[in-house]
Amino acid sequence: MKWDNLGPINLIIGGNGAGKTFLMKACYCAMRTLEAYKRGNDTKTATEILAEKLKWTFQTGKIGDLVSKGAESPLSSRIQLDGNDFQYSFGKDTTKVIHSLENHVPPRDSNSIFLPAKEVLSLHQVIFNSRDQYWLFGFDDTYYDLAKALMTPTTQGRLLPELKRSRDKLEDLLGGKVDQDNKTGHWQFKKGNQKFPIGMTAEGIKKIAMLDRLIGNRYIGKKSIVFVDEPESALHPSTISEFMDIIVQLARRDIQFFLASHSYFVVKKLYLIAQEKNMPIPIVLVNKENECIYTDLLQGMPDNTIIDESINPYKQKVKLALG
């Protein structure tokens, strides 16, 4: 696939197994490689960082297993960032070392993050133990990186206006705040004077709380790239709508989003945003023939199975009513 002319918000849709999450994880691996490279005292090469990132993100002992069995050519990837190329390739016999890598992207100060469909607040200690203590596959690096990022405490000081408005809206949606207990290290939900263990808190609240925390502790900010897998997961349709409005606010602060979704409500809300704000929202649709179709929500709602299946119950109701 080749996806050009990306925007502040980009949408990926398609059926189960179409490769939506795989695509976002591949992009995430590239971005985290560029962000870790030459940061602080890290002396690893970009090749070493990428190989380790691919291993732990895709949970494979042999990187070459990511290449299709019948592929005649290597798997190759090229990302262009601010006009600079980062590209690599490897074949199915590759084990741990990627020999073909070319990087022209300057070291980055920003942080990218991947928000999986499942929350991590109630699992963060299990995630750390499986990786830091036992070095076992189970929770991939999108979960591990997110769990680490959430551990950074929120900091004092003024946020940029757009980020503050977004955080205020997130906390309005939550109806309270999610924070860590200083003594136990456990997450809890605070609502007024009441405190609830995170395990008793709704999945949707925990999902929104993660983004709120990442804004509050300054982990994400200008030039960050946020990958969100199934943003609709565990959220009521009205909350989905408000969540998309918040993402638009953040996108205006030079934070780029990639969303992979199955939800009619997500697609429709983003379509309305594109029309109302005259805002391009590029979209790639992977169809049943595994072909990539590129369009933009500014041009209208795309033809796809998500839309079709969403309106089918209405069509059936009309058919029953008319006999």
Image (cartoon, grey):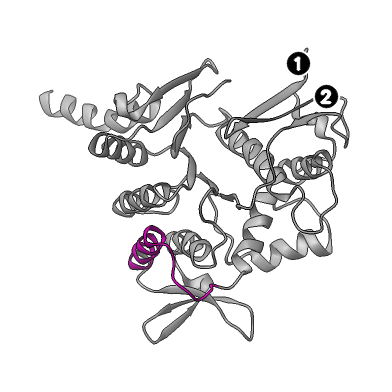
Q: Is residue 140 visible?
A: no
Q: What residue type is labelled 2?
A: Lys
Q: Can residue 97 be seen in this view?
A: yes
Direction from residue 294 to residue 109 in the image, left or right: right
Q: What stretch is highlighted in magenta?
A: 154-172
Q: Which mark is residue 92?
A: 2
Q: Residue 71 carries which label?
A: 1
Direction from residue 52 to residue 257 in the image, left or right: left
**Mark 2 element type:** loop
Residue 94 spot, x, y in % from top left: 87, 29
Residue 20 spot, x, y in % from top left: 55, 33
Image height of 303 relative to 28, above or below: above
Image height of 17 relative to 142, above or below: above
Query: Residue at horizontal 35%, vertical 71%?
Result: 175
Residue 298 spot, x, y in % from top left: 31, 28
225 and 263: which is toward the camera: 225
